[in-house]
Image: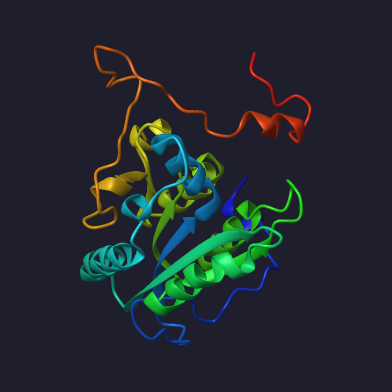
Amino acid sequence: MSVSEIAPEMPVPAQAGSGSEASSGSDVRRVLLVWDAPNLDMGLGAILGGRPTAAYRPRFDALGRWLLARTAEISIATKGRIEAEATVFTNIAPGTADVVRPWVEALRNVGFAVFAKPKIDEDSDVDADMLAHIAARHRDGGLAGIMVASADGQAFREPLEAIAAKGIPAQVLGFREHASWAVTSDTLGFVDLEDIPGVFREPLPRVSLESLPDEGAWLQPFRPLSALLTSRPGQGVA
């Protein structure tokens, strides 16, 4: 699937969270960061073996500073005005609005735009919305760079490769043990989230098949076993 084939009519905001005041001028291009909150929460939970404590929650102020620095790097080699656009896509489960609201407001205060969608059923995720936003930005010629933060990122592989093929810097941000396809990609860059200064206060307790201790280690499930009761038929393990 090409980028232009994804939700071509979906409207997008004239300006979304950036490190500076966004402009509506057609000469402005964006270095876009898309943060896939549901997928990253799952990936981080798998690494930690449970819900993250404060020490292991990503710091978006540090991420924002990194994005601004990356935007400055791209600006050096690009003509015209370049601005950063930071976005977070998330689901809001029923009854959790009051719990999630402080996090959403903190993100907006830092300079991130938040796309929030009710989690009504298994099909109400935000993958299509993220792809549509990337497609819209690319379609209007406003992309100077693209970074997608997702634990595995497979849903973004073809669109990102299509963008990179046009000479636009494209990167995947995630965890190397979950996104080996991006780590070894010849066309896409990969940045491990833990390598971005200040994103995590403490080192993550990471264990992978390539770095097992001599005494062995537990690899925690990506999702609770009870999810099998609501998953679609055919989503099994051979």
The reply to whether residue 141 is in sight is no
Establish if 190 lies above or below 30: above
Establish if 29 lies above or below 50: below
Q: Nearer the viewer, residue 53 or 159?
A: 53
- Residue at image coords 53%, 33%: 222
Residue 38 lies, in percent from the top left, at 55, 51
Q: Nearer the viewer, residue 203 or 197?
A: 203
The reply to whether residue 129 is in sight is yes
- Residue at image coords 42%, 68%: 86
- Furthest residue toward right: 233
Quadrant position of residue 135? bottom right
Where is the N terminus found, in terms of image quarters?
Answer: top right
Residue 187 lies, in percent from the top left, at 37, 41
Residue 116 appears left or right of 77: right
Residue 117 appears left or right of 65: right
Where is the C terminus found, in terms of image quarters?
Answer: top right
Residue 175 lies, in percent from the top left, at 37, 40
